[in-house]
């Protein structure tokens, strides 16, 4: 997607190059900032995308100075950037951009420190100011209110909200309202890093820039769609957060539903900010409502027990968090998009921790040919499938049936057409955060969730959360290192289908 547009066609301000930017990270000493945000900014600096007037201001309660922060970030770059990508000249250039402010956001009297640091930068009041809130969502409203009080929430300011955006519809609305009292919707960037992945964006290009697929992209030719986001790791150090969240809130409500939207959305008039988000919203509003009966029939919650991952024994989830718990670490569900294009087509979603491997993939399974034209052939035919690999090894694979070369009759054989982005384009694919952070700086909201999208997703998930909150609900156990509970396989088997595991 083009993030360098200089002319607007949707009535919003044009996306323009930025000459000066103050990029402030609340939670600047935290894991997200050091593991993802600062390395992403380093790589953008290395590729010449940060203007000379670009500053990074880390904000947290830690009592360190500028030099201490630069030392901390230098260590993070050595740890989280590949050695082959490290250039000491660029590292030094980024470190020179860094500044630090010690601030407890609850302390009203301390906010002058941030105000003074930002005001001592570029002389122009037109400087773009990005405030990235890599902190608990409970602080989002407070931070925005304080920014307004000290005069930093100007028309040139943008705020980035990290997930989770609430824990249910009510709390999501509260967060949105608190932030919306200070910032206009066009200045609020709710980030979902999945939308910044190359293969996710390429899905739109594949669908809408190639005419051979569009006539097939509907209920007449598509049998069903599978979306999988699997992780091989456990909860690790995120146990305290994860045990309050669970896989449904952590992954389904945002990542998986966003992927579903991109698969199912109608073609927008053009691919730009509000047009894409308008179409995604329509998909969320068209999802079949989940009644209590449908929750019981069409959803599976699981929790990993002890098992083997990569040949090593691992503990159960309950042992990792230190107490018995009913939090789900695995979700599988069946839903439908109730509109003209997709009526009757099942969408199967699953996500989980401690599965056999880390993989995110969309599989579009087409219907079988309506007539068997090769009755005396050898071999078997399989349904055509389009595998869209989101991570790792981003790319696509189209499975089809071909004739095996040679005389003596027709021998049918499944084959695949592969597109590996790394092989096809021969260049490093930028990390999702690299793309999304620069989109924030340039003011391009296309890949970010709008308020009504977030609330529509929570509205759809709410009946599942309610049903699963009942005392009688217990997640099904599955051994670590397996594909999840047996019930997840049964969810498809009763429809005569099966999960398409990674090949």
Image: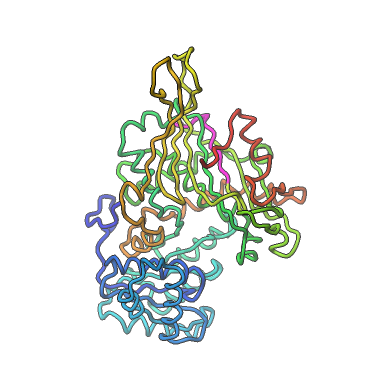
Residue drawn 32% across the image and 61% down it:
443
Give the number of callouts. Answer: 0
Residue occupying the far left of the picture: 7
- Residue situated in front as seen by the camera: 264 or 395: 395
State the image coordinates of residue 76 (x, y, percent, origin top left): 45, 74
User: Which residue is outermost to the front?
Assistant: 407
> Which region shows up in magenta?
340-350
Q: Quadrant of residue 70?
A: bottom left
Question: Is residue 126 shown left or right of residue 116?
Answer: left
Q: Is 68 left, or right, of 171 in this rendering?
A: left
Is residue 9 highlighted in magenta?
Answer: no
The answer to which image quadrant residue 427 occupies is bottom left
* In-front residue for pair 366/117: 366
User: At 39% across and 77% down in the image, what residue appears?
Assistant: 57
Residue drawn at point x = 54 percent, y = 33 percent: 346
Residue 213 is situated, as x and y percent measured from the top left of the image, at 36, 32
Identify whether 261 is placed above or below 98.
above
- The colour scheme applied to this rendered structure is rainbow
- Residue 35, horizontal then vertical, whole percent: 47, 68
Farthest residue toward the top?
376
Q: Residue at x 46, y 41 (%)?
A: 283
- Give 450 or 248, whichever is nearer the viewer: 248
Residue 371: % across, % down: 46, 15
Q: Decide if residue 225 is on the left or right side of residue 213.
A: right
Height in image: 384 above or below 2? above
């Amino acid at each position: 997607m083009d993030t360098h547009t200089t002319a607007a066609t949707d009535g919003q301000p044009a996306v323009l190059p930025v000459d000066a930017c103050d990029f402030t990270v609340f939670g600047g000493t935290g894991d997200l900032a050091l593991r993802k945000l600062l390395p992403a900014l380093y790589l953008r600096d290395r590729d010449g995308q940060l203007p000379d007037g670009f500053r990074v201001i880390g904000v947290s309660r830690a009592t360190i100075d500028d030099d201490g922060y630069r030392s901390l970030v230098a260590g993070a770059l050595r740890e989280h950037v590949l050695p082959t990508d490290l250039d000491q000249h660029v590292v030094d250039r980024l470190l020179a951009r860094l500044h630090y402010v010690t601030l407890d956001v609850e302390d009203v009297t301390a906010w002058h420190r941030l105000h003074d640091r930002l005001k001592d930068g570029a002389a122009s009041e037109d400087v773009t100011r990005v405030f990235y809130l890599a902190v608990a969502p409970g602080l989002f409203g407070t931070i925005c209110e304080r920014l307004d009080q000290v005069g930093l929430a100007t028309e040139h300011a943008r705020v980035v909200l990290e997930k989770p955006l609430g824990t249910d519809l009510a709390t999501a609305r509260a967060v949105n309202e608190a932030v919306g009292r200070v910032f206009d919707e066009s200045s609020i960037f709710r980030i979902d890093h999945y939308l910044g992945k190359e293969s996710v964006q390429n899905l739109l290009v594949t669908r809408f820039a190639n005419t051979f697929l569009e006539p097939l992209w509907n209920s007449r030719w598509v049998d069903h769609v599978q979306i999988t986001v699997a992780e091989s790791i456990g909860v690790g150090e995120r146990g305290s957060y994860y045990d309050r969240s669970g896989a449904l809130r952590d992954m389904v409500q945002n990542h998986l539903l966003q992927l579903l939207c991109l698969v199912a959305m109608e073609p927008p008039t053009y691919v730009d900010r509000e047009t894409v988000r308008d179409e995604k919203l329509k998909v969320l509003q068209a999802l079949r409502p989940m009644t209590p009966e449908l929750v019981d029939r069409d959803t599976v919650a699981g929790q990993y027990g002890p098992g083997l991952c990569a040949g090593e024994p691992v503990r159960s989830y309950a042992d990792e968090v230190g107490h018995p718990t009913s939090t789900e670490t695995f979700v599988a569900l069946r839903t439908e998009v109730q509109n003209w294009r997709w009526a009757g087509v099942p969408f199967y979603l699953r996500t989980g921790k401690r599965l056999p491997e880390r993989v995110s993939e969309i599989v579009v399974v087409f219907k079988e040919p309506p007539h068997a034209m090769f009755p005396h052939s050898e071999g078997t035919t399989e349904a055509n499938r389009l595998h869209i690999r989101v991570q790792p090894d981003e790319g696509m694979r189209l499975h089809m049936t071909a004739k095996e070369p040679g005389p003596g009759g027709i021998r049918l054989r499944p084959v695949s057409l592969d597109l590996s982005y790394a092989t096809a384009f021969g260049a490093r694919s930028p990390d999702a955060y690299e793309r999304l952070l620069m989109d924030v700086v340039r003011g391009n909201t296309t890949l970010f969730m709008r308020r009504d999208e977030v609330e529509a997703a929570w509205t759809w998930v709410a009946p599942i959360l309610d049903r699963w909150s009942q005392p009688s609900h217990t997640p099904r156990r599955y051994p670590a290192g397996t594909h999840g509970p047996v019930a997840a396989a049964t969810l498809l088997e009763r429809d005569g289908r099966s999960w398409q595991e990674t090949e």
